[in-house]
């Protein structure tokens, strides 16, 4: 059963509960996390909570709840949902107060939803996805997982309308990340991914892939690269909590390598599935 949570209360996830003056709604003044639960167990919960608290601190948002509180709420919600495999979204916002750019002196709000997995079209995993390169028009602090996703949404929508699965963003001729994913290239048996600077979200799946690569003795280089490197890669793949690992077989409608999902990508995906 899909359920929701708002400031201490368990609710139906589609209940109309947010007051107009909620700052997440008015200003996007908040941060969020998306965690996947496999077989009743949240995957890399510690890393997700680290990022949640890091993001909150970065926007000067003080949460009343401790990590342990959030973990306990999450565990309770998973149990109540009765779902073994589910998606958890958690949001922390600067609370409910009359509209004013200045910070209000009110408690932060915490909301969550627990819902069945949002399933991806699995043919993408078998056949590979297309990506569209687009200008990265976001702000400078993309490492903070804020609720402000408008440039990401606009890019994803434009990529979708052009027949691509994901928009991959480019800032000053450097590839940063997808609109909701991180990007990896494989070149000469080595993984290459943009470094974890402030211009990308430090993806938890990205972190898992780097760890898996070490386990499989596949070298990883975290270094900046231009769009040309994507066209010239042997393999390309995207990572995120929701899509896990998805091979990319075309960029701007141009085929990458032989146009099939690569062997190293498959190996990493299999190892990832073993972990989850
Ligand atoms: C902009 C952006 N980059 C990367 C990711 C992947 O992060 P994670 O693997 O933690 O889901 C996401 C996930 O939503 C994202 O929104």
Image: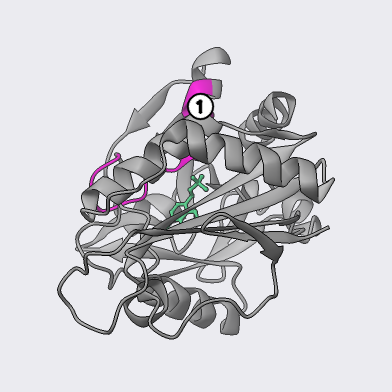
**Quarter of the picture holding the C terminus:** top right
To which quarter of the image does residue 219 belong?
top left
How many numbered marks have been drawn onto this rendered protein structure? 1
* Residue 167 placement, left or right of 50: right
Image height check: is 23 above or below 208?
A: below
Q: Which of 194 and 235 is in front in this view?
A: 194
Image height check: is 38 above or below 111?
A: above
* Residue 245 placement, left or right of 146: right
Residue named by callout 1: 189
Q: Can residue 187 be seen in this view?
A: no
Q: Which of 199 and 60 is in front in this view?
A: 60
Q: Does the magenta stretch include residue 207?
A: yes
Disc 1 Cβ-to-ligand 1 distance below 8 Å: no
Residue 62 screen position, x and y as percent: 28, 49
Image height check: is 119 above or below 207?
A: below
Residue pictured at 33% horizontal, 54% vertical: 176
Q: Is mark 1 on a helix, strand or loop?
A: loop
Q: Is residue 5 visible?
A: yes
In the image, the segment drawn in magenta is 196-211
To which quarter of the image does residue 50 belong?
top left
Residue 164 screen position, x and y as percent: 59, 72
Residue pictured at 69% horizontal, 35% vertical: 266
Q: How crowded is mark 1: few (under 14 residues within 10 Å), some or many (20 or more)?
A: few
Q: Nearer the viewer, residue 53 or 107?
A: 107
Residue 252 screen position, x and y as percent: 50, 70
Q: Does the magenta stretch include residue 216?
A: no
Residue 134 screen position, x and y as percent: 38, 72
Image height check: is 126 above or below 154?
A: above
Residue pictured at 47% horizontal, 42% vertical: 185
Residue pictured at 73% horizontal, 51% vertical: 125
**Quarter of the picture holding the N terminus:** bottom right
């Amino acid at each position: 059963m899909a359920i929701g949570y708002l400031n201490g209360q368990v609710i139906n996830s589609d209940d109309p509960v947010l007051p107009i003056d909620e700052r997440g709604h008015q200003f996007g003044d908040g941060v969020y996390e998306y965690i996947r639960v496999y077989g009743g167990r949240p995957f890399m919960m510690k890393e997700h909570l680290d990022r949640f608290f890091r993001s909150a601190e970065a926007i000067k948002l003080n949460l009343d709840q401790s990590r342990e509180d959030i973990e306990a709420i999450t565990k309770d919600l998973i149990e109540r949902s009765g779902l073994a495999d589910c998606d958890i979204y958690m949001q922390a916002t600067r609370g409910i107060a009359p509209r004013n750019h200045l910070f209000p002196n009110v408690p932060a709000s915490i909301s969550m939803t627990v819902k069945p997995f949002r399933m991806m079209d699995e043919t993408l995993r078998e056949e590979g996805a297309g990506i569209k390169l687009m200008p990265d028009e976001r702000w400078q602090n993309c490492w903070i997982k804020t609720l402000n996703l408008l440039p990401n949404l606009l890019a994803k929508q434009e990529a979708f309308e052009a027949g691509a699965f994901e928009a991959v963003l480019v800032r000053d001729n450097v590839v940063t990340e997808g609109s909701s994913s991180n990007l990896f290239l494989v070149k000469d048996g080595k993984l290459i991914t943009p470094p974890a600077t402030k211009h990308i979200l430090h993806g938890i799946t990205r972190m898992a892939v780097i760890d898996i690569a070490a386990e499989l003795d596949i070298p990883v280089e975290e270094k900046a690269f231009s769009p040309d490197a994507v066209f010239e890669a042997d393999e390309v793949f995207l990572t995120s909590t929701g899509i896990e690992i998805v091979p990319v077989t075309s960029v701007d409608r141009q085929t990458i390598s032989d146009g099939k999902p690569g062997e190293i990508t498959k190996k990493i995906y299999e190892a990832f599935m073993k972990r989850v």
